[in-house]
Structure formats: structure tokens, C-alpha cells
């Protein structure tokens, strides 16, 4: 049953060094405030799982929180590269970063399997790609044969993170969570995870039904924390728009280790706790 | 080619000819960046019935401005339907119900295989690129694929460093052997002209050039020995209507080749 | 692209003798008007697919339209038996009825596989039940082994009906379909089928977004026909309630072959075409 | 037992004791008919925080009257969330996140295996029953299962004609061997009393009887040689509050044993 707590408390309780942590939100509702709190609490050796690492994981990787990255597309949308991610892969700074790389379809189905209590999912994918290349050994992708037609398809192993962290528009006083618009893979991530943290724009007395909404009942969530603006510079439909300038402005910061260190000191360690 | 005399830029004629490749009342799975600009231009001009689908789960979206990412709010707010990410890949893309997949590329080879993963070796890459995203399954499952890329020896190579998304594979019969249901890339649209697969070899050959572009220029900016169709066409320049519509959008040119 | 036609035209065009036909709607939005039109047009040798046959398939079976039934729960909800279904199975009247029997979870996953372009789906199910009994040979249920853990799970073969028939609250003038409330398995049935017929309470100029709504874009549907009250005695949320008395009243009619014949003559063949 | 003197019917005390078996702030996957009545009674009395889940995809539903089917409109209109049928089985039931599965039965055996498929042989049944519905996976995946059934030699048999939903299988270790994640049936609640599995044999034995019901009566109405726990309890009668709440609902008794 969801406990309503502060963001610092939620991250402190839910995230442990060495955990596999999935912070999801497909362009929309990216849980930046929670990610920054993970950096602030200096969590280490995390396996970071996310379809689109985006700025949030560029920051966590640069800050040295990550041992491994499980992902499917690591760019700065509309801008270019994630330079902290590249620096870790190309030059092992601040440390080596193990990669477990998939396609979006593969990652989505891995979460579906995790949420469904199944050890694997089946899809048409990877066939002929470098990700199937035996040279590039990949323990989470294997062929599977249809027992009815004999056709060979692709199996991907389930994702069951220790913790899933998402941002939603609202929760009610009991901890029922509501998000709407592009809802991505958040429901699957929370249902697949052992523990979960949901930050919300606001806690309201009750949740009136909305179009294109996903509701996560309180009994499926571990911690709910109010964090207004918690997905900036990403966006929260109905609350604020995507700050495209901030995504542009990240490029020169991410390119340079010193500017990045200064950004960490100023924006994360300097900033007052939520 | 000279942007000054022509009255349009290389990116503009590339986007216009990509838009022209999309037929009205078809469905298109759109990658971000150059493909998104062209698809929206098509919808704004000759293909008002074009159904735009983005991997964020937005189906039949009608943005009034160009999204910077595949998940901008405008895509959800103007969509016929918004579905989850697993659903967009499993129910909509995978069964082959989408007519055209529209992709960009950092590097692609003479068989239209696409690399958006690494330049150099995978374990110690010279340049780490963003990776696969939705592209491998778009390339596998859409009825056909159109690739849009700025032409250079760096981008159009004999052999890609990593096959992120399968084009015509290693040539004739390759896709069938891999169990890929769609026809794969049928057009590569660049800032110089258009390449199409030779029906016999599946190797991409030049079939059309923009005004004032020479075959030599195209060959110089290609990493393989580029052949040209005997009936090599000169493609018509953008119309004023097309340019006006395109320029009313956010400039696509701002966005890098590895955007999606 | 959806054609907007009359119900008689839609059924005439879409349904052929010998077809595998799925009429879905999980208690809510059962396409009775379309089912009655199938009887009226005297379609024969149909393989009828439906999770809960309900009165609609009791009527089609009694009328002699069906060769085979693919299903998971064949009762009269809140009342008792489906007597035409029982008469066919127990006494082969009006003819023998082949059964392909599953659980709800199995049927749902078979539609999901069909909608996903996969030949099979994987679930935890059937283990230890009579449906897995080798004596009761079942070509659409087989074991499948996880290539990662070695665990043995159950595979069910995909359902790809020739025709899916559903009832929805609304469509717009272009043929985009919107249904809401308990949306069951209708989206999967339509996306899994080669052809589809959607009857609607009303055709409206535009579809404003609604909570808990499913939208099927016009290009995924073959025929849309206006059929107000088309799911009675089932219900259409926002239009009319379930007619529980009619479900009770069906029991004595269904029990008796003569009373059923009279019902057919009066309600189906006697009734004016829609 | 005599309804006249007791002031409540056999169905009423059965429903009340089934309701009492449900704890507050747990989740319950509800079959239609007798289980639905008992679950809603629990929510109306001692378990206001009981989360009711129906296979129609309604989660946390709070009907103000008893649904006649598992898909009545009132279930959707009062739910915390409404999901598709594949989702309710795959994301919600299958992973074992639901505490109690609450089932009815046409026929069940001493190991609590349930038959709702056929009386007689499968190929030529004497009586064709509705079939499986959601029951097999409810019985497989919920953390525990409660079965509610009117007691008779026809219903409680030595061996079911068809195993629709697995209870304790063939005894100790059976569920583990079958890979069933939940604990299976822990209580069978009838109109005479309550049966629970013997921890050693997994065979269901009588652990409680309602007032004025004798062990002989229970044995007469059981198709196997019914054992009774030494400390056989007499279960408390319904309270006035429970009866008042129950009688404010649509009468559950109207509904037949093969309802779901």
C-alpha cells in the first residue's frame, strides 16, 4: 500500500546501492526530480534501466551512479548526442559502463513479460541485426520456436527491476496514481518492479476520470511523493511544456567534464533538498 | 549545388522529395528529425489523408508544428488514438499493417542496411551513436521503408560498421531468409537525389538527381562505386507551395543526423 | 478504410459460409443486431469464436449457423445454462457442434497473438487441468520452454478470424470507431481479423476524447453500420442498461426447441431488415 | 437445518461466513454469483478496504448493488481502474499480486479440484456445464483461493468428472509439481459449514459447522468419507448487521450453481 512521503524519504527507502533501477517516462513525464535526488543521495553501482536514457541518465552516468546501462536509444532528442553517456562508453569516464542494448520493441516486451509474471516475451525482432550477432554475445536475446508452426522467433528475457521510478500528474490522498497523455511504458515498469516510487505534480482529494489516462491503484505502488515540476525539462501534459531550450542548453554542459562538474555542484549538491 | 542561385537549400529539396514519396491515404511510421519534417510536409500538401504514427504511441497525429522529439505533447493532443509503447510495437507495427516506415541514418551501405549504433568496433567504438530505438522493427515490419540521409562518404559506405536495422541485407533473398515480413528500403532520399534498389542485385543505384547536381558529385559523395540507372532522371525542384509550407515549420535542418 | 453501409450490406459483404467469425463484447456491447442479421442471411458452417457465447451464440447455434464453437465460458450470466448450446453438445441438435475449449486467459492471449502478428502467445495456464489432458487432444495448447530459465510454460496458438464483429457506442463520419466502459477484447479481435464489421449506436460528426475509451481508426475497420440498440439485451454504457429480465426470459425459450423455432420466426425472420 | 427457527436461510449464513473469510485491505478476484454476493457483503461490513477485481477488467470496483454478470455497467462506473481483458489476466492475475481468488463450483472433490465443464464424459457429457471462464487461472495464480458451494453429494464428490480448475491436485506437492504459484483452495464454505485442507494429506476436512447443523447431516451431504477436525467448531450465526446488509442487496439465492 502506497506511503505518501517526501521525495528524499522515498528515494532513501526505495533505492539501495547496487539496485537495478528503472526510471521511465517516454519523452513525457521523465522523473528528473527523483533522478536528481538519487544523485544527491550518492547512490552507487546502479544498473540503470530505461528505453531512452535522455538527459536524466546522462546526468546519473556522469555523476558516477551507474555500473551498467540497459537501454534502447541513448540520444538527446532533437539535439544530438548524450556526451556523458558517450564519455563513459568511449573513454570510461567517470568509470566503465557495461551496456545491455536492445531495440525499443525488445525493451517494451521485456517490461511486459516482467509485469506479467513471465520469464520471457516473444517478438519479431533482432533478426539479422548486430544485436543478434554471436560475436556481440547477448544473454537477454535468444531464438524461440513456435510449437505450432515451427517458425523461429525472438525471445527476450523479462525485466523485473528492484525499483521503478516514474512521475505522474496526480495522486489522491490514498495514493492512487493517475497519469495521462503519452503514458509510454510506466505501468509495465511499476508492475514489473519489486518496489516503486511515484512523484506527482500534485496530490488531490480525488481522481476524476480522464481520457487516455492510466491509473495505478495505491496497493501497486510503494511510495508516492509530491514533486511539482518534477519532470522538468521534460513535460507534464496539462501542467507545463517540454523545455526544448534546456535540452539544447544541455549539449555544451554535457560535452565538457568541468562544466558538467560545475553543473552537479550548482544544480544538485548545491540545491536545497526537496 | 548552389543554394544561392536555386532559391532553396539542399535540405529543403531533400525534404520536399521525401515528402513527395509519401502517397495520400497511407499510413507512415515516422522517425524523428528529417523524416518527421518530410512526413508533415506531405500531410500539409498533397497527402492530407496520410496517417502519421510515432513510436510514442500516437496514431493519426496532426501536429500543427514540428515535434522536436517523438513524444512531444502536440502529438498526443492531436492524435486519433494514443496507445502504450508495447501496444504501438506489438499491435500496430509488428503485424505489418503500416504502409511506410520512414527512417534516418547515421551510416548506411549499398544494400540500405542502417547503422545508428557505433562508428568503429562495438566494444571500443570510435563514436558511440544513440542506438536502435524503434528503427530495427520499423525496418523489419513496415510494408516498405524510405530512408532520408544527407549524402557523404562518411554516411554512405560500402559496409556499415554495425547493422542496427536490416535493409536489403546481403542482397537478393536475404530478407526472406531472415523472416522479415516487409519489403525493406525502396528509396534512399538524399540532398543530391534519389537512390533505389536494383531489382536484380538489391544494390542501391542512383535513379534521380536534383537540378544542377551532377552524377560525378553524387559519386564523389558516396562510399561505394555508385551506379546510375540509364534513364537517370532530373527531379523537379520544389514548388513555391511546397517551400512555403516547409518554411512555415520549425526548420528541420537544425536537427542532427542521429536524431530520431 | 472503413465503408459506412447498412447492417445487412455489412454482413452480406463481410461474412461468408464457412468463415471463422468472432463476435466479441465482454458482457458489455455484445453485437446482437449483427448476430441476428447473420441468422437472417442464413449463413452456414461458421466457426463461431467468442470468449462468452452468451445468448447471441445460443441463438446462432440453435439456428444452425455453426459448425464449430471456440470459447471459454458458455453460460447465461446470472441465470444458468445456454440450452441451445447444451442441446447441440448433448444431443447434436440441430447438428453436431465441434468444440475448441479454452480458459478466458487462454482465449484473451490467443487474440493478443493474432493482433500482434505472432503465431502463439505464452501464459501460465492449463497446467493440471482437463484441457491439457492428452486424452482430450487439443491442437491449440502446447507446452513451451523458456529459453532463459528452462521453465515450462503454456503456449496457445494465435486466433486470426476471417471476420470480427463488434458493437461500439459511436463512430465519426470517416468511420473512426470509439467505445468505452468495459472494452474487453474487442480491439484485439478487430486487429486480429482479416475483415471487420462494427455496428454503432450512432454516427456523430466528431469523436471527443472520453475516459476509458478505445479508438479504432477508420483504416483498421472494414465496415461500419449504424444500429441503434444493436447490443440489446446486453448494454451500451451511456445509452442503455443491461436488460436482465430478457436474460431471465431467454431461459424457457432456449429450453424448448419449438419455442425457440417460434422465437426465430417471430424475432428474426419475421422482423423487418435493419 | 430449519430456516424457520434460525431467522436466516442456509444461503444467508453461507454468504455471511464466506464474507467473514475475507480480510480488510486485501485484494479479491471475484467470481460471479455466490462469491460476488459474499465479497460485496464483506466490503459493506467489516472490510471497507477490500479491493474487488472482476475478470471484466474492473479493478477496485464498489458496486452499490450486486452485479448479475461479471461485466455489469455498475462495475466499470465505480472502479478505480478499468483495463482490457488481456491486461486483467496478464498484468493483474498471472503474476500472483492478488491475495484471494473467490470461486463457485458445480462439482468439487476432496482435494478441492473444481469442475465447471461437464458431468459425465467430455466427448458425450450427461450435462454440459459452462466451462472454465477465468477460474483455472484464478485457482492457479491467486495467493489463496476460497470456494463457496451448496453442499450435496452431487456437488462434493470423491473425484470430479473433469478438472477445470486445479485445487490441491492429487495431494501434497501436487501444485508445486504443476508449477502453480498460489497456495490453492484454503477454505470451502458451504451452506452447512466450513471445510479446510488437512495440512498433512491436503484432503478437505470439516472444521466448522453452523448452529443446528449436525456432523451426520454434513457427512450425508458429502460424496466422500468426510472427516472432521477433533476441535470441530460451531460457527457463530449471522449478526443483525450482516443480515441487514445482505438483505439490502439483490438476493444472491436467485442465481444457480453454475453462474460465474
Image (tube, coloured by chain):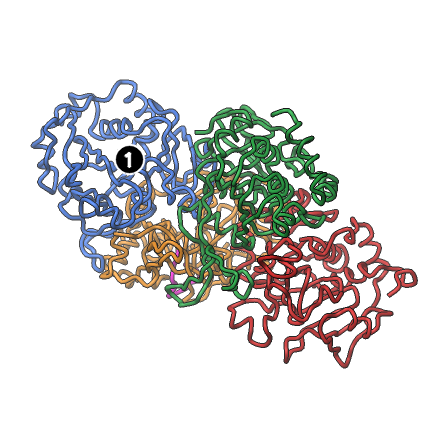
Chain colours: A orange, B blue, C green, D red
Instruction: Say whether residue A3 is visible.
Output: no
> Residue C18 in the image: x percent, y percent?
48, 39
Q: Quick check: A155 left or right of D13?
A: left
At x 36%, y 37%, the residue is: B98
Q: Would you call the spot at circle 1 few (<14 residues within 10 Å), some (14-19), or many (20 or more)? A: many
Vertical order, C169 against B93 (above or below): above
Question: Is-magenta flag for residue D174?
Answer: no
Q: Quarter of the image containing the N terminus of chain C? A: top left
Determine the image quadrant of residue B51: top left
Vertical order, D190 against D58 (above or below): below
Q: Quarter of the image containing the C terminus of chain C? A: top right
Residue bounds of the magenta highlight: A39-49
Q: Quick check: D238 left or right of C263?
A: right
Q: Nearer the viewer, residue A258 or C47?
A: C47
Q: Quick check: D67 left or right of B85?
A: right
> Residue A108 in the image: x percent, y percent?
41, 51
Q: Residue furthest top?
A: B240
Q: Nearer the viewer, residue B198 or C211?
A: B198
Determine the image quadrant of residue B52: top left
Q: Dot 1 corresponds to which residue?
A: B34
Question: Is-magenta flag for residue A43?
Answer: yes
Q: Nearer the viewer, residue B90 or D118?
A: D118
At x 66%, y 39%, the residue is: C234
The residue tagged with tag 1: helix, strand or loop? helix
Instruction: Say whether residue B208 is visible.
Output: yes
Vertical order, B100 against D104 (above or below): above
Q: Quick check: D24 left or right of D218?
A: left
Amino acid at each position: 500500500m502506497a506511503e505518501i512521503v517526501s521525495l528524499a524519504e522515498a528515494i532513501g527507502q526505495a533505492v539501495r546501492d547496487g539496485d537495478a533501477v528503472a526510471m521511465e517516462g517516454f519523452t513525457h513525464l521523465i522523473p528528473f526530480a527523483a533522478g536528481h535526488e538519487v544523485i544527491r543521495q550518492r547512490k552507487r553501482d546502479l544498473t540503470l534501466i530505461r528505453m531512452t536514457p535522455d538527459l536524466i541518465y546522462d546526468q546519473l552516468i556522469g555523476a558516477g551512479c551507474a555500473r551498467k546501462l540497459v537501454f534502447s536509444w541513448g540520444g538527446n532528442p532533437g539535439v544530438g548526442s548524450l556526451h556523458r553517456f558517450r564519455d563513459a562508453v568511449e573513454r570510461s569516464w567517470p568509470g566503465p559502463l557495461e551496456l545491455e542494448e536492445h531495440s525499443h520493441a525488445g525493451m517494451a516486451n521485456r517490461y511486459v513479460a516482467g509485469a506479467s509474471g513471465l520469464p520471457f516475451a516473444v517478438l519479431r525482432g533482432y533478426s539479422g541485426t548486430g544485436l543478434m550477432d554471436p560475436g556481440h554475445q547477448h544473454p537477454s536475446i535468444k531464438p524461440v520456436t513456435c510449437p505450432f508452426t515451427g517458425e523461429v522467433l525472438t525471445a527476450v528475457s523479462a525485466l523485473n527491476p528492484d525499483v521503478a521510478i516514474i512521475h505522474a500528474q496526480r495522486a489522491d490522498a490514498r495514493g492512487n496514481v493517475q497519469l495521462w497523455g503519452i503514458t509510454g511504458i510506466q505501468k509495465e515498469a511499476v508492475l514489473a518492479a519489486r518496489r516503486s516510487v511515484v512523484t506527482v505534480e500534485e496530490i488531490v482529494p480525488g481522481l476524476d476520470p480522464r481520457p487516455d489516462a492510466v491509473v495505478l491503484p495505491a496497493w501497486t505502488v510503494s511510495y508516492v511523493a509530491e514533486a511539482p515540476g518534477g519532470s522538468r525539462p521534460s513535460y507534464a501534459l496539462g501542467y507545463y511544456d517540454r523545455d526544448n531550450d534546456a535540452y539544447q542548453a544541455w549539449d555544451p554542459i554535457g560535452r565538457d567534464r568541468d562544466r558538467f562538474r560545475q553543473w552537479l555542484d550548482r544544480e544538485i549538491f548545491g540545491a536545497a533538498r526537496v | 549545388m548552389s543554394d544561392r542561385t536555386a532559391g532553396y537549400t539542399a535540405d529543403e529539396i531533400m525534404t520536399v522529395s521525401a515528402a513527395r514519396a509519401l502517397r495520400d491515404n497511407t499510413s507512415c511510421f515516422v522517425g524523428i528529425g528529417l523524416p518527421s519534417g518530410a512526413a508533415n510536409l506531405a500531410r500539409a500538401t498533397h497527402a492530407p489523408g496520410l496517417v502519421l504514427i510515432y513510436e510514442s504511441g500516437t496514431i493519426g497525429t496532426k501536429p500543427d508544428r514540428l515535434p522536436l522529439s517523438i513524444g512531444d505533447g502536440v502529438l498526443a493532443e492531436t492524435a486519433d488514438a494514443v496507445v502504450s509503447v508495447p501496444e504501438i510495437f506489438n499491435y500496430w507495427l509488428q503485424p505489418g499493417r503500416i504502409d511506410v516506415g520512414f527512417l534516418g541514418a547515421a551510416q548506411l551501405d549499398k544494400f540500405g542496411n542502417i547503422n545508428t549504433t557505433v562508428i568503429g568496433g562495438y566494444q571500443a567504438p570510435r563514436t558511440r551513436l544513440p542506438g536502435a530505438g524503434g528503427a530495427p522493427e520499423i525496418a523489419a515490419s513496415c510494408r516498405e521503408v524510405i530512408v532520408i540521409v544527407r549524402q557523404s562518404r562518411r554516411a554512405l559506405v560500402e559496409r556499415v560498421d554495425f547493422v542496427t536495422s536490416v535493409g536489403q541485407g546481403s542482397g537478393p533473398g536475404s530478407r526472406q531468409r531472415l523472416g522479415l515480413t516487409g519489403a525493406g528500403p525502396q528509396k534512399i532520399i538524399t540532398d543530391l537525389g534519389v537512390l533505389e534498389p536494383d531489382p536484380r542485385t538489391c544494390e542501391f543505384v542512383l535513379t534521380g538527381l536534383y537540378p544542377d547536381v551532377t552524377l560525378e558529385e553524387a559519386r564523389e559523395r558516396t562510399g561505394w562505386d555508385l551506379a546510375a540507372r540509364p534513364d537517370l532522371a532530373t527531379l523537379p525542384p520544389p514548388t513555391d507551395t511546397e517551400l512555403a509550407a516547409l518554411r512555415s515549420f520549425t526548420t528541420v535542418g537544425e536537427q542532427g543526423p542521429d536524431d530520431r
